[in-house]
Image (cartoon, coloured by chain):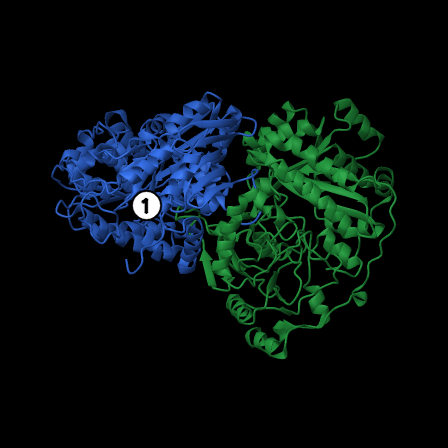
Chain colours: A blue, B green
Amino acid sequence: MARWGDHPADLGEAARAFLREHVGPADPWPAAGPAEWTIRDTALSPDEIAELRGIVGDDGVRADVASRIAWTGGASYADYAARRDGKLVAGVDDASPSSSWDVPDAVVLPRDHDEVVRVLAACRRLRLPVVPFGGGTSVVGGLAAQGRRIAVGMDLLSRLVSVDAVSCRATVQAGITGPRLEPLLSARGLTLGHLPQSWQRASIGGYVATRSSGQASTGYGRVEDMVEALRVATPEGTLTLGRGPASAAGPDLRGLLVGSEGALGIITEITLRVRRLPTTKRYEGVMFPDFTAGCEAFRALAQGRATADVMRLSDERETAVTLAMSGPRGVTGAAFSRYLEARGVAGGALAILGWEGTDRDQVRDRRAASWRALKRHGAVSLGRRVGESWRSGRFHGPFLRDTLLDLGYLVETVETASDWSGLASLHASVTGSLRDSLGPRPGPYVMSHVSHVYETGASLYTTVICAADREDPVGQWRTAKHAVSDAIVAGGATITHHHAVGRDHAAWLPAEIGALGVDVIAAVKARLDPDGIMNPGVLLPPEGPR
Amino acid sequence: MARWGDHPADLGEAARAFLREHVGPADPWPAAGPAEWTIRDTALSPDEIAELRGIVGDDGVRADVASRIAWTGGASYADYAARRDGKLVAGVDDASPSSSWDVPDAVVLPRDHDEVVRVLAACRRLRLPVVPFGGGTSVVGGLAAQGRRIAVGMDLLSRLVSVDAVSCRATVQAGITGPRLEPLLSARGLTLGHLPQSWQRASIGGYVATRSSGQASTGYGRVEDMVEALRVATPEGTLTLGRGPASAAGPDLRGLLVGSEGALGIITEITLRVRRLPTTKRYEGVMFPDFTAGCEAFRALAQGRATADVMRLSDERETAVTLAMSGPRGVTGAAFSRYLEARGVAGGALAILGWEGTDRDQVRDRRAASWRALKRHGAVSLGRRVGESWRSGRFHGPFLRDTLLDLGYLVETVETASDWSGLASLHASVTGSLRDSLGPRPGPYVMSHVSHVYETGASLYTTVICAADREDPVGQWRTAKHAVSDAIVAGGATITHHHAVGRDHAAWLPAEIGALGVDVIAAVKARLDPDGIMNPGVLLPPEGPR
C-alpha cells in the first residue's frame, strides 16, 4: 500500500512545535501516485496464466496493473520512501537500491488449502517464485521480492473454521485479520488478545509467519505461545503439526514453521489458543523517576510473577514526546507539571500498565501485587485517564507515519531484546548508533520503550525521527540500519524481537544463530522447497558480503 | 542401572493387601546379577581406544565390563525386565526381543565442550555410533542401542558455569543433575523448579534432550520454557543458539534441539531461566466428588489463570490406591471415611495443589483465586497434611517399581496429553486398551492422573499393574504398548507428553507429525550428522512396518 490510511493523523500544533524544536525543519515530501510509477508488463505467458486459472478459477488470477500494485511490497521505511518517489527497492541488502518499482507478474488468490498446494505444485513446474502475501505489513522487506514471480494473496482464506470453547481453541484460515476475527470470537465470549501495531491490516497467518508479538504479550503471550496446531502447504506437500496442548514427541516442528516467513511454505490454517473475553479491564498511567527505575520495577514484576497484561515503559525522551503530543486531551499543563515535580518524577519515564480478567477480585489482587513492587521503585500513579488514552490511541502509530513522511521526516523503528543485565547498555548503543549514523542532519531524535517483558529480559523498541535525505532516502536509511544492526549483534542482543528477518535482517542472521544454524534452516528449506521458489531472498542471508 | 535404589521401598501390609485384592497374586521375581550376564568383548581396536584416549585422556575411556554395564540402557519396563532376566532388548520395535544384553564397547567421559566436539569428529572418522548418556533414566528406549558403539557419559560435564542473578539466568553443563544443581542455586536465592519423577538421577541435559516436564510444570513451565540458550556439539561442529528472552529471528532452532534425544548432537551447555527461591509454600490435599468434576475444576483454574504451581488430580482408582498405600501416616481410618461421606466426596478423586512464591500476600491471593473456582466444582479441602505427605513422597515412584518388580508385578506408565474436549474419551480409551491387552491375567489395575495443566488441555498419566508374564515379560509389555499407543494416536492425542520418543514411540511419530514432518527431522539430521552416528534408532522411526 502507498499509505497506511486514507487520512493522515492530525499532528496538532504542540507536536509540530516539538518537532521543530527537537528535530528541526524538513521539506514536505509529496507522494507520487501510481499513475507516475513505471510498471513493466507481466512476464507470465498466457499458458502460464491459464494453468494457474485452472486451479483457482478465472477470477483467482489477476494480472492487471492495479492488482499487481496492490499486492506488492510492505510497510518498511524503504517501501514507503520508494513508493513516494515512484521507485521500489528490495531492501537493505539489495545491490541496486534505485531499481524501479517492481510489482509481481500476477496475483493468485486461492480459496482453500488444497488450491494453495496445487498452486505451489504448479509454480514448481513453472519455476515461478512465490511471495505469500497476507496483510502486506512487513517492515523488514519480507515482501520486497524482485523479478518474475507471483504474489499469493491470502485474502480469500479468511474464515473462522471452528471454535472449541471447552478447550479454548479456535481454528482459523491464515488470511483472516484481527479486526475480523475478534468480533467472531467475542460473540462466543472469547478473545485472541494479539494486538500488533499493524492491527488494522495484518493477517493471523502473518502473525505466525513472522513470529510476532502484540502489545499485550506480557499477559497473552507471543504468537508462538498461541499456536496449537498448523497446516502448511509446501512445494513438497502438506505439513500438519500440533497434537495436544504440549508434547515431547521430538523436536518442535511447529516452532520451525512459526517464523518461517513464507520461505518454507504457506501457512493456511492455524489452531489458536484463545482466552475468555475479559470482563474487567484496568489500565493506568504510571510515572517513574527515570527509565532506569522503571526497568528495575518491570524486572521486579516479571521476576515476582506480578506482571500486568500490558506493560509499556517509555524512556525519558519518548515520555517527553508522548506528553507533548497528547495535546489538550492529554496530561499536560502547569498543574500536571507541578504534580510531577511534587512527586519527584518530573522529567521521568512514563509507563502504561493494564490488567485484564474475568474475575474482578483476581484482577484487583493482581494489580495490588504489581503495585507492591511498583511502589518500591518510586512509581507514581497518573490514574486511569492516561491508561485509557493510551488504549484508545494504541493503533495510531502507522497513521502517524504517513503524516510525518508528508512533512518530510524519516521515521523508522528498530526493535530488539536483551536479558535484563544487558538492557541499559543496549539502550545506549542503539541510541548512539542511530544518532551517529543519521547525524549531523537536523535531528535525529531517538526515543525508546520497553513493551514486552519476560522473566529474564525485555524488548527494546526504538523510534528515530530526522529530516529525510530527499536525494537518497533509502541510502540514508540503509546506513542507519547497518549501524544499528551491527550495534545490536555486537551487544549480544537479538536482531529482531518481533518484526522478523525478511531481507533487511538476513545479513545479521548468521551472527545470531551461526553459520551452522543457517545451514540447518537451509537444509529444511531444501527438503520442503527443493527448487527454491518460496519467497526467495527472505530469511536466509544473501550469498557473499553484505 | 539394575535397580533405581539400593533399598526397595517398603510397601506395607495395607498396600500388599490392596494388590492381592485388586490385582491378584504374583510370583516373586528374583533379579539376575551382573555376574550372570553375558557380556561380549569390546569391538574397539586398541588403535581406536588410543585415538579416543588422545582426546579425553587415559581415564576418560573405559572399556572394562563394569563401566560398560553401568552406562547401558535406561529405566523402561523392558530395560528392567531384561536386566532382571540377564537379557537386554532394544525396545518395542526391536526385531529380536530375546537378544542378549548388549553393552557399549566403551564409555567415553569428555571434560568439556571441545572434547565432545573432538570425540564426535573422531567417531565420525571411525564410523562409530555414539549414545549420549546423562542420568540413564530414559523410559522409552532412548539409550537402548545395540551393536558396535560407545556411550558418551556426561558425568564430568557437571558444573554450574555461571549465574546472572539480575536476569535470573543460570548456565550449566549438561551433565549436572537436579539434586546437585538446586543447592548451588538456592545458595544464591534461586531455583530451577524442574522436578521430574527421575529426579535422583536425571541430568539437566537429559531434561532438555527429552523435552521433559516436571511435577511443578503448571507453575514453573516445561523444560522448553526454561531453555534460554543452548550449546550443542554435533558431528558437523558447534551450534550456539539463543539470544535474548525472545526473538523473531526466524524459526526457533532451540526448539529443534530441545527434544532431539541425542540424534542430532550432544547438548553440552544450557542457559536456563531460574526463579527466585520461594519463601512461602502452601500444599494441600483436595477431594472432588469424582474425576470428571476434578477435570472441570482444573480446566476452570487453567482458563481462569488461577492455577496453582503444582496441580495433580488422580482418578478414582488412583485415589483408592493412594489412600490404601498411605498407611498409618496417611489419611485413612473410619473417621476420615465418615468425613468424606459427610462432604459428599467418598469414592471421589484426590488432588494435590501447591502454591509457591516470594510474596506471602500474593500466594494467599493466588490460592484464594484458585479456591473460588475449586468450590464451584465441589472441591473439599483435606488440609495441608495430605499436601505435605505427597510432597515428601513425590520422588518415591521409581523405588516402588523395584519393590513391585521384586514381587513379580509388571508396572508400567503411559503418558499423553489432549485438549480438554478429548480428555475423558482419551482416559477411557487408554484404560480400556491396557485392560484389554493385558487381561485376563490377574489384574490389570489401571489408574490415571492429570499432572500438567494447560489452558487448552492437560496431560494424562496412566499406571498399569498386573502379574508379569515370566515366560515373555517383554512380549507381554510390547503387546500392551502397541495397543495403548494405537489408542492414543487414534484419539488424536500426542504419543508422549514428557517421556520423549526414544525407540518405543518412534513407530508412532509419523502419525503425529506426518511422513513429511519425519522427513524434515531426517533432513536436519542429515545436515548435522551426515554419517548417522548419533544415537541411531532413536527418534526417527524404523524403516518398514512396525
Left or right: A340 as drawn, with respect to B14: left
Q: Residue at x 79, y 56 (%)?
A: B7
Q: Is residue A123 above or below residue A113?
A: below
Q: Residue at x 15, y 46 (%)?
A: A469
Residue placed under numbered mark 1 in the picture: A128
Quadrant location of the N terminus of chain B in the rendered image: bottom right
- Tell which of A73 and A287 is nearer to you: A73
**Picture coordinates of residue A184 (x, y %)?**
43, 23
- Tell which of B534 and A468 is nearer to you: B534
**Picture coordinates of residue A346 (x, y %)?**
30, 37
Left or right: A317 as drawn, with respect to B211: left
Q: Amino acid at mark 1?
A: Leu
- Is residue B170 in view from this perspective? no
Q: Which element is circle 1 on?
A: loop
- Is residue A390 in view from this perspective? yes
Q: Chain of mark 1?
A: A
Name the image quarter holding residue B296: top right
Name the image quarter holding residue A25: top left
**Picture coordinates of residue A341 (x, y %)?**
30, 35
**Picture coordinates of residue A277 (x, y %)?**
47, 25
Name the image quarter holding residue A330: top left
Q: Is residue B370 above or below residue A296?
A: above
- Tell which of A287 and A78 is nearer to you: A78
